[in-house]
Image (tube, rainbow, N blue to C red):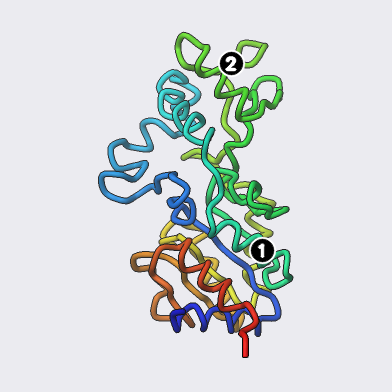
Amino acid sequence: MSAGAARLAALLRAARRAVALTGAGISVPSGIPDFRTPLTGMWANVDPMEVAHIDVFTRAPERFWGFYGPRFALLRDKRPNGAHHALAELERRGLLAAVITQNIDGLHRQAGTPDPIEVHGSLAIASCPACGVREPREEVARRVEAAGDGVPRCGCGAALKPGVVLFGELLPEAALERAFRLAGEADLLVCVGSSLEVHPVAGLPGVTLAAGGRVALVTQGPTPYDADAAVKLDGDVEHELEAVMAALEPQGV
């Protein structure tokens, strides 16, 4: 067991109110690429402004869904990994008050986190901007495959829109307010798999620190908060959190 895992376990035991913040890195062990890793990241070979902007969805749904269609298909066989399950178990034990996530893959819910704060929305559903009908991910994927132009459409004929925040859109106000409130109330914010570069969510550790709380990092690569962190675990996030869970178990005599 690493000293870092033992340190984070001790911080979790001592915390009055711990909150987790997760980014794309927590889902990489589940086979979902992150966004910015060279060659393999989701934005490595495409300009997001050309495929994932609200204006592209409105003006050129074929181009938009040419990018997003495979995202829906990709999630079909993806399952939560040990890191997702560890956070769900920490919440079940009362050692974690909430999970805030930048991810849109829905894996926290699948792992058993009852109410993740999904600040960037979720691919679990798509909706019709014209009439408001909502369709589950599986049905959207079916319509993508069946459509000649790759655009899943509502019965009214309008293109369905994924339930995620696109470039050019504001984050959901209620989720964002809740996330900042939780960060301000937390005496420990555990940031998992996030480079903490995408604002405004990247500012949450600063909110916790300003309120007198501590920040723990479980992520590979540098973040703007490395120097301020009470502990940083920089190995594989699944292995690191599983080690933390092991450190929380009662030790034999």
Question: What amino acid type should be assigned to the residue bearing mark 1?
Answer: Glu
Q: Is residue 179 above or below residue 127?
A: below
Residues packed near mark 1 inside 10 Å, few (<14), some (14 to 19) or many (20 plus)? some
Viewer-proximal residue among 184 and 251: 251
Quadrant of the snapshot with the C terminus: bottom right
Question: What amino acid type should be assigned to the residue bearing mark 2?
Answer: Arg
Q: Is residue 38 above or below residue 216?
A: above
- Per the image, the residue denoted by label 1 is 89
Q: Nearer the viewer, mark 2 or mark 1?
A: 1
Instruction: Label 1, secondary structure: give it.
Output: helix
Percent position of residue 154, x then y: 64, 16
Q: Residue at x 51, y 75 (%)?
A: 216
Instruction: Label 2, secondary structure: give it.
Output: loop
Mark nearer the N terminus (2 vs 1): 1
Q: Residue at x 45, y 60 (%)?
A: 194
Percent position of residue 233, x then y: 43, 73
In the displayed structure, does residue 8 sit left or right of residue 136?
left
Q: Kindly indicate whether the residue at mark 1 contacts the one at mark 2 (C-beta within 8 angstroms).
A: no
Hey, which residue is sitting farthest top in the picture? 148
Viewer-proximal residue among 159 and 109: 109
Q: Residue at x 52, y 67 (%)?
A: 241
Name the mark on residue 99: none
Residues packed near mark 2 inside 10 Å, few (<14), some (14 to 19) or many (20 plus)? some
Hey, which residue is sitting farthest left in the picture? 39
CA separation, marks 2 and 1?
38 Å
Percent position of residue 234, x then y: 39, 70
Name the mark on residue 153: 2
